[in-house]
Each structure stands twice: as C-alpha cells, then as structure tokens.
Amino acid sequence: MNDEKRGGVAERSPAELTLRAILLGGLITLLFTAANVYLGLKVGLTFATSIPAAVISMAILRGFKDSTIWENNIVQTVASAAGTLAAIIFVLPGLVMIGWWQGFPYWTTAAITGTGGILGVLFSVPLRRALVVDSDLPYPEGKAAAEVLKVGSQSREGAAESSKGLSVLLWNSIASAGFAVLTQTRLVAGEATRWFRVGSGATGGGFTLSFALMGVGHLVGISVGLAMFVGVIVSSGILLPILTTQNPLPGGPEAWAGQILGDDIRFFGAGVIGVAAIWTLLRIAGPVIGGVRSAMAASRARHAGEALAVEERDLPIAIVGAGSVVMLIAIGWLLYSVIASGPLAGSEALLVSGAVVFVAVIGLLIAAVTGYMAGLIGASNSPVSGIGILSVVAAALMLAGLFGRDSSPDTVAALVAYALIVTGVVFGVATISNDNLQDLKTGQLVGATPWKQQVALVIGVVFGSLIIPPVLDLLNSAFGFAGAPGAGPNALPAPQAALISALAKGVLGGDLNWAMIGWGAVAGVIFVILDEVLGALGRMRLPPLAVGIGVYLPMSLMLPVSAGALIGWFYDRWAAKRKDPEFAERMGVLTATGMIVGESLWGVVFAGIVAGAGSGDVLSLAGPGFEGVALVIGVVLFVALMTLLYRRTRRLVTVE
C-alpha cells in the first residue's frame, strides 16, 4: 500500500475511486437521470442528486468492511454529475419542436451531451483552489452532502441516520409514484383548472396535484418559492386580464388565455429572465476574474516545487489543457458532421471555426460564472437556464451576423438547428461546471482526493450521456413535446426548450416578439432593484430569475412549487428547534427528494407503457362523467398523504 497524506497525516491509501463505487454510481445514475429528464420536461426544474445518492451509497456499501467515506463520496460524485447533465433537456427537445429532428439520434445526442459535459469538468479544474479552497462561498448543497457522508460513515448515529434516510426516500417515493399511478386511472384527478371571464378579458389557472412539484418547492426554499408566486401574480393576475381585454379572440376564456400565454406572456418572462441572468453575471464578474487569477497562481506555485497534500492534488494542468483541445476538436468534428450535407453545406469552415471559438470563449466564462453561482446559492438554485437563454441568443446573433436574415426558409431552419446544437454543447459546460465545484467542496470537507473526484465527474458525464438519449426518445415517442409537429394533448411542456428554440427562431427569422421581451426586460430591471432593496434592508429577497420563471411557466405548475416551499419553510422552522437540527433538516430534504423521485420514475415507466400500447389512456378506468368526484378524491387523498409523509419524517427525527 502507498502512503498518502490526508489532513497532513500519512496513512495507508483507503478505498476511494473503486470499481464498485463507479458501478454503484452508474446504477444510481440510471434511476436519477431518468427521473430528472422526465421532471425537467414536465415542469422545467430538476432536483439535486448528491444527498440522496450519498444516502443510498452508505446504506449499500456499509455491508463492505473496507468501504470508506471517500468511496461513498465517489458514488455521489458520479451520480450527481450524470443527474445534473440531464439539464441538457432544456435545449435539445427544441430540435424536435422545430421539426429538425423526429427523434433523438443516439450517438449525435450523446456526443452533444458528453463533449460539453467533459469540457465543463476540465474548464472548472483550475477554479477549484480559488472558488473552493480559498473562498468563503457557502456551498450549501456541498456542505450538506459532506455532513451526510461524515455522519453516515463515522458514527453509530450516522448508521442509524443512513437507515432512516433511506427509509424516508423509499416510502416517499412509493407514495408519490402510487398517487401518480392513480391519476392515470382517472379515478383520482391530477389537476384542478379553471378559466373565467374578467370584464371583457379572461384569467384563471390551476393547481397540479403533484408530489414532485411540492418536493421541488421544499428544496428551492421559501425565497425562491415566493418569487415564483410573484411571477404567477404578474402573469395570470395582471398581464393575462389586460392582454385578453386588448386582444379579444374567438372562443371561450380558456382559448384566449392559452394563446395569449403562448404568444405574449412567455416572451415577457424571457425578458425578465434575460435581465436577471445578465445582472447576475455583472455582479460576479469581479470575483470570478480574481478567482481565475488565484487558481493560475496556485498552479504556478505547484510547478515550482511546492508540496501539496492529497486533498490539494488536482488533475495536472497539462492533462486539462490537452483534454480541452481534444474535446474542442471532437466538437468541431461533431458540428461538421451536422452541416456537411444540407442547406449549410459549403460554409463548414466558417461555421465550425466560429462555433468552436464561441464554445471555448463562452464556455470558459460560463464555467467560472456557474461555479461561482453554485457556491453562492447552490447548484439547484443557480440560474443555469438563464445562461442557456443568453447562450442561444448570442449564438443566434453570431449566425445572423455571418449569414444575415435574408436567407431562404430552409437555410434559416438549418441555422436555427445549428444554433441549438451549439447551445447544447455550451449548456453541457454550464450544467457540469455548476455541479463540479459543489462536489469538489464536498470532497474538500471530507478530505477526498480532488483528481480522483474529477475523474469520477468525467465518468459520470459519460454515464449520463449514454442514458439520456434513449430516455428522451422514449418520452418523445410516448408523449411528444408541446409545439412540436403532431404533438398530442398529453405532450410534455418542455418549457425551457420551447423558449430557447423560439428565441433562436426569432433572432434568425427576424420575427421575434421584441415588444414583449422589451417590456419583460423593463420589468426585470424593476425586480432586480426590488431584490437589491430587500437585501439592503435585511429582508427576505425575491430572486428576479425566479420571478421570471414564475411568469413564464403555467400557474398550474408554479402554485404547487410555491406551496411546497411554504411547507418546507414550516418544516425547517420545526427542524431548527430539534436536538440535532442539521439531521432534522436533512431528513426534510430526503422527504422532498423521495416525492420527486417516485413520481418522476413512474413518469418514465408510464412513458414506456404508452409507447408500447400506443395510447395515453391505457390505464384509464373512469369516463368524463367522473371528473367531479375524481377531483374531490384527488384533493383529499393528496392532502392526507402529504400530511402523513411529513408526520412520519418528524416521528423518525424525534425517535432516538
């Protein structure tokens, strides 16, 4: 055995980057990535997988005498990287929505996802020392995961916690999935929706009875939840009545509302989101530049002969540089293969070289920005979708500058698809950089070896890249995506992908709804000022990006998120008064995570059932006349189960 230094003390090399850790991480990846893909397409939000992966890992590896905290850390690193990469769904379904793809070609989809993800790992390696080691950024999720690993691996109480945590995760998943199954039978309603006239206009909305959405609300927190609720008030309570009054349409209130929400309000929300994302970038530009300089200085000191403990050993900068070049070459080849035939043939050199430079420059910036944001507010709450919006607008403007806006319809369609593919690569960089430094913070707190974690992150990216394409293809075959050719009534909204593809089409086609985007940008400035004023007064803040998401997404999806945030707030206040408040709070996190995992995994299973049966009503047991009774049953059962699940968690927390 080789001797290594952990915490400055020489000791034998423990189990860390092991085959069983990689395989277990891959198995968890299969489950959580599938769940995240479904949830993201349904509601536009994904959940962090680090903590539940750590709990499952500890429960399983506890049976091996030589398992260690560092090996469990590798498991959660692999699983969290792949789960985070599922956010690529915020871009790629747009290629189906615009009719460029009919499905998801396996190797092309995997290559777009994998090259961007690996580049995100490599770009963020030089930032570790500056943004993790020499920084006072809070890294809320990284610290929470580290505490789970410490307690779970080093004490008898930790073993009990691991067992309780796994129990909560399992039973909440079963309850969540079970309720989702009942909604598919139509014996239990899944949503309550009501549209009505307001003067000569219309308004209304709904509430989706979804355990997954409630769990998301618990995890994002009260500040984000309230901000989303403000966005709902702006969209459905203010804009919708005004716009439907000014633009009366044929049909009833529901038809009016649906068209106005799609044609105008979502672009208003895009304006809010764009301003919020730009403001975030401006705020953190200085610290990020300083962080990069610090990281470069640390690298030079190491090459000058300074000894580093195991906890400080990153992947060698030469490997990082060579790997980045290889990935950029692979990206160039991928892009060339996409445009080698078709309307853009003959412009390969210009388009590929411009896109590779774009990916390299914007990718480096995004790696620093998203890494800093993850440290500041956590990977789950980082405005990565806002980064995607800025990326696609920048990519589309670059292509418009190269080709102009007077091209043929076929050329414009090809340019839109190309902009989405380039954005997909950049988005892979963004999502993994957002996750990478969070995981490395966990590793730093438990004394892990950074380069081994960085290798595990690459492995997680590979796992995720191989899993995501068939899951996307399955959901597309079973449900389709709203706005895509031939999409049915049960089509998944895929809200971010719809917005990003609409922005690309608008910029390149010259028909973007700039007026509503402009008004949204003005509102975004107002929300930014409001958030800063609240921060200066020491009050609860309302993140403007969350307000923009609340404007953009339907009320039926946002209200349960806001309700879940309120429930989570009450739970955390109760947890703060317990004997071990950190344990009590983590159990609440696992409660919410279980609710998300159960419903999301059932969504993937149901997609397979629908794809095989060729019908979305294959499980339906009730007809239209039962809707009123189903709604009453659904509401009562939903509230009862939610109450029981949280009471069970509280009982497990208080039992010694």
Image (tube, helix red, strand yellow):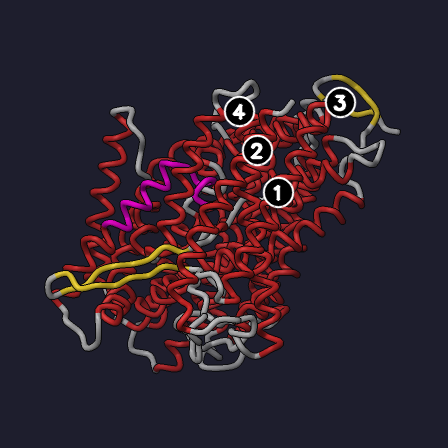
Mark before the other along the chain sequence, 1 or 3: 3
Q: Going 50% across and 52% down the picture, which residue do you hit?
A: 360
Q: In which quarter of the image is residue 21?
A: top right
Q: What residue type is labelled 4?
A: Asp
Image x and y of residue 4, in percent: 79, 25
Q: In this view, does 608 lie to the left or right of 647?
A: right
Does residue 102 belong to the magenta stretch?
A: no
Q: What label sits on residue 339 in the rendered view?
A: none
For the residues carrying marks 1 and 3, which lies nearer the camera in this image? 1
The label shown at residue 5 is 3
The magenta stretch spans residue 222: yes
**Could you tell me which quadrant the C terminus lies in?**
top right
Q: Which of marks 1 and 2 is nearer the N terminus?
A: 1
Q: Which of marks 4 and 2 is in front?
A: 2
Residue 134 is labelled as: 4
- The 10 Å Cα crowd at callout 2, few under 14, some 14 to 19, many 20 or more, is many
Check disc 3 and give the amino acid type.
Lys
Which residue in the structure is indicated by mark 2?
587
Q: What stretch is highlighted in magenta?
A: 216-233
Above or below for 250 versus 500? below
Under mark 1, the amino acid is Leu
| Front residue (pair 429, 530) | 530
Can you say whether 573 is above or below 606 in the image? above
> Which one is in front, 164 or 36?
164
Q: Where does residue 190 sit, x and y in percent of width and height? A: 44, 60
Quadrant where the image shows the N terminus: top right
Does residue 65 appear anywhere in the picture?
yes
Task: Name the disc covering residue 169, or none.
Answer: 1
